[in-house]
Image (cartoon, rainbow, N blue to C red):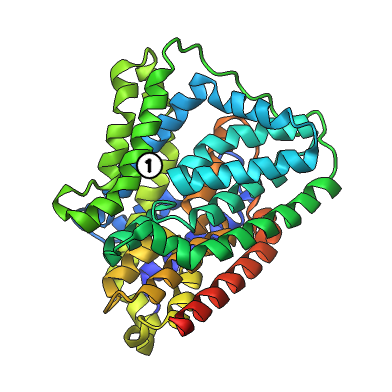
């Protein structure tokens, strides 16, 4: 069923893939927003349906994360962490600490927050190691994606799955099913991209921009308090959902509470508001409109065909969640999949969590964190990686990590 919505979605994907051949002022969010506008103008989705299609919980969550990330940068924490990592003075050890730190941040604070915090650190390391920033930025994307897989709060799609699954022990369940492939995949990221970093060319004078210094902010405690609140509230959400659903705090609300100290007590509250990554928020709002139109058109259901009756089978879940994430990004794919899923068996939900997360390591638009790294890099005046640079660099990581995760979950399911 070749609907207008499907055609527009494919055009958007292709334009993002060849963005480096378009005029330099064209950004990813311009392309996605244009696609949503076309669908609205053509009547493929009504304005009211477009508003309903947007997952405002995700948008509000990202707003809070961007505000906290901006405040943390102004507090000087990115520079401090970057200098501590650089002080190891051994490139291999520096790269390993960078991977471990960003993976841990991703598991605890979600991959989107890790992408915001980690981008300036990656740029600092690129200058210190005298290497073009492309490899380190790609390593950041791969690491926050893989690191987020092991935690029920590691990324938005895992939070959706943890909420829908009503697990007795969300943290333990995710660790039991996904810790082994996560650690093995992180080891491969270190070996594969570490090799590229060592063998890559040295940076030229124009390759790396100077990272702007943090603004003078005498009050740093609002940023740290906001971060602590965000970690605690997002982490507690799935636990509260299990023990007392009436007390559950949606991660969008948790994000607003987390950034509240910054807007209430920081001396730079207005500047922080202006520095929120509004283009990325526009990108995701437009993406939800595009995917909402596609779902409304029935194209997805037609493409699934008889597979609609097999969505509770882990092999089918792995295949659909991986390939659908390449076109529509993993957050809306998981949201849609959970709505179509007839039941919530643990092995199938873990397969959905693991494979949909790792699918983000193939194309830029497959994961929200990839887009955030691109836009944050451009915000700092740094030209990021291209669509194909990213895909070629992470293809082996994708193949290995998906294979490890699929094999481990299948073995665990067989022995359960």
Q: How many numbered marks does the figure carry?
A: 1
Where is the C terminus found, in terms of image quarters? bottom left
Residue 325 shows in this picture? no
Give the residue pinned by disc 1. 62
Secondary structure under tag 1 reads: helix
Q: Residue at x 35, y 52 (%)?
A: 37
Q: 358 or 295: nearer the eye?
A: 358
Query: Is 355 above or below relative to 115?
Result: below
Which percent across, then down, holds residue 73? Answer: 51, 25
**Crowd band around label 1 with a 10 angstrom C-alpha radius: few (<14), some (14–19), many (20+):** many
181 sits left or right of 260 in the view: right
Q: Residue at x 41, y 24 (%)?
A: 223
Q: 59 or 239: nearer the eye?
A: 239
Which percent across, then down, holds residue 220? Answer: 44, 17
Classify residue 262 by image quadrant.
top left
Query: Is 210 above or below relative to 251?
Result: above
Query: Is 13 above or below relative to 206?
Result: below
92 sits left or right of 41 in the view: right
Q: 381 or 394: nearer the eye?
A: 394
Q: Residue at x 59, y 58 (%)?
A: 17
């Amino acid at each position: 069923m070749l609907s207008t919505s499907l055609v527009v979605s494919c055009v958007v994907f292709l334009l993002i893939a060849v963005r480096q051949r378009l005029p330099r002022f064209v950004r990813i969010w311009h392309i996605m927003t244009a696609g949503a506008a076309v669908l609205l103008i053509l009547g493929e989705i009504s304005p009211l349906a477009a508003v309903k299609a947007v997952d405002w919980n995700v948008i509000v969550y990202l707003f809070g994360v961007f505000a906290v990330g901006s405040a943390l940068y102004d507090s000087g924490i990115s520079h401090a962490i970057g200098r501590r990592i650089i002080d190891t003075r051994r490139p291999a050890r520096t790269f390993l600490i960078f991977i471990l730190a960003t993976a841990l941040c991703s598991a605890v604070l979600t991959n989107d927050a890790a992408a915001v915090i980690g981008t300036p650190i990656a740029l600092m390391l690129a200058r210190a190691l005298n290497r073009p920033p492309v490899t380190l930025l790609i390593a950041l994307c791969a690491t926050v994606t893989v690191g987020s897989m092991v935690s029920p709060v590691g990324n938005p799609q895992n939070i959706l799955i943890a909420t829908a699954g009503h697990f007795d022990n969300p943290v333990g369940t995710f660790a039991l099913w996904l810790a082994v492939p996560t650690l093995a995949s992180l080891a491969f990221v270190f070996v594969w991209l570490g090799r590229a970093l060592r063998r890559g060319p040295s940076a030229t004078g124009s390759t790396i921009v100077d990272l702007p210094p943090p603004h003078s902010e005498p009050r740093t405690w609002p940023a740290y308090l906001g971060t602590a609140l965000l970690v605690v509230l997002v982490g507690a959400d799935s636990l509260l959902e299990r023990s007392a659903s009436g007390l559950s705090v949606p991660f969008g609300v948790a994000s607003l509470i987390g950034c509240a100290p910054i807007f209430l007590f920081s001396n730079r509250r207005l500047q922080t508001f202006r520095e929120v990554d509004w283009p990325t928020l526009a990108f995701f709002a437009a993406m939800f409109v595009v995917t909402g139109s596609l779902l409304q058109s029935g194209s997805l259901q037609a493409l699934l065909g008889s597979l609609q009756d097999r969505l509770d089978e882990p092999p089918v879940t792995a295949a659909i969640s991986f390939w659908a994430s390449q076109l529509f990004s993993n957050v809306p794919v998981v949201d849609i999949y959970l709505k179509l899923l007839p039941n919530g068996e643990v092995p199938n939900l873990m397969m959905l969590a693991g494979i949909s997360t790792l699918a983000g390591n193939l194309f830029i638009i497959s994961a929200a964190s990839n887009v955030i790294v691109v836009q944050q890099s451009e915000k700092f005046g740094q030209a990021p990686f291209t669509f194909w640079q990213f895909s070629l660099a992470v293809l082996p990581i994708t193949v290995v990590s998906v294979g490890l995760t699929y094999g481990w979950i299948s073995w665990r399911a067989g022995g359960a």
